[in-house]
Amino acid sequence: MIIAGSIVAAIGVLRRSCWAGNVVWAVAVVTWYPTLVCLATSMQTGEAWIASAMMVSMAGLSLAMATIHGKADQSPATIRMTAMQRWHAVLWTLGQTVIFWSVFLWVLPMGIVELERFCGVNGFEHGFQLPASIGLFAAASCLGLWSGVTMATHGNGTPLPTATAPRLVIAGPYRFVRNPMAVAGIVQGLAVGWYLGSYAVLVYSLAGAVLWHIAVRPVEESDLNSRFGDAYNEYQRRVKLWIPTVGQNAIQMMNPVERECR
């Protein structure tokens, strides 16, 4: 069903058929069934995490394709504005957070560790490893949740590109760093690698940061610049991408944002 459905979906997308979106979504739904079976097996046995990681990757890409293609009345787009009521945006954001954290901070790292052990690569252990890594993960998670909820409540949208906020948000943690969710995600990944004692997971987390910086960031910044113009340019000038901005610049960014959100 997955292979045949993918072929039909690909043909529909290439021909821009009106039914293509429905088939793409159907394939995404069908793909998640065997994925959940694999996850249940791994959770019960503590094994086969490589297979679960591969299935989650396929299911995630299928779901991403479905959101990009959208509905029959929408054109394919990697970035699409979606205005929502605040409570609706918060619920969608929390749901997305659960999915992203489960995939990128649990299933994929477990698959990497299993592959690492299969290849005979030993991990590392040291004193205070568990409490320190858990503390770091908790702090980064709080930053991630704060960022997502801020985006939902002030921007009336979600952090997901295909349902992005229609308003420029420079409130909460966005006053100190331009993409606090990316910072939080990278630190979370490093904390997971530290907790698992896995060099490969640490490399995986840093590789994700490089990939985001090279491939994702330019697309997002181009979209924000086209939609918000001078306001976003001023924001870029005052607030740095990776290094938190503190002091007068951060304070000065507060008032324009509050006016924007009202």
Image: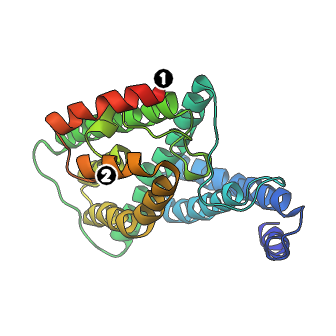
Please tell me which residue is depicted at 29% across the width and 63% down the height of the picture: 206
Decide if residue 171 is on the left or right side of residue 134. Answer: right
Residue designated by label 1 = 262
Name above or below for residue 236 compared with residue 210.
above
For numbered disc 2, what is the local secondary structure?
Answer: helix
Q: Is residue 239 visible?
A: no
Amino acid type of the residue that numbered disc 1 sits on in the rendered structure: Arg
Viewport quadrant of the N terminus:
bottom right
| 165, 61: nearer the viewer | 165
Name above or below for residue 209 compared with residue 81.
below
Q: Quadrant of residue 181?
A: top left
Q: Residues within 10 Å of mark 2 (few under 14, many from 20)?
A: some
Residue 9 image point, x, y percent? 81, 69
Residue 49 image point, x, y percent? 49, 59
Nearest to N terminus: mark 1 or mark 2: 2
Decide if residue 164 is on the left or right side of residue 74. Answer: left
| 82, 234: nearer the viewer | 234
| 195, 75: nearer the viewer | 75
For numbered disc 1, what is the local secondary structure?
Answer: loop
Please tell me which residue is depicted at 75% across the width and 60% down the height of the picture: 75
Q: Which mark is residue 236?
A: 2
Cα gap from disc 1 to disc 2, whole angstroms: 22 Å
For this orientation, the residue located farthest to the left is 127
Amino acid type of the residue that numbered disc 2 sits on in the rendered structure: Gln
Residue 101 image point, x, y percent? 46, 45
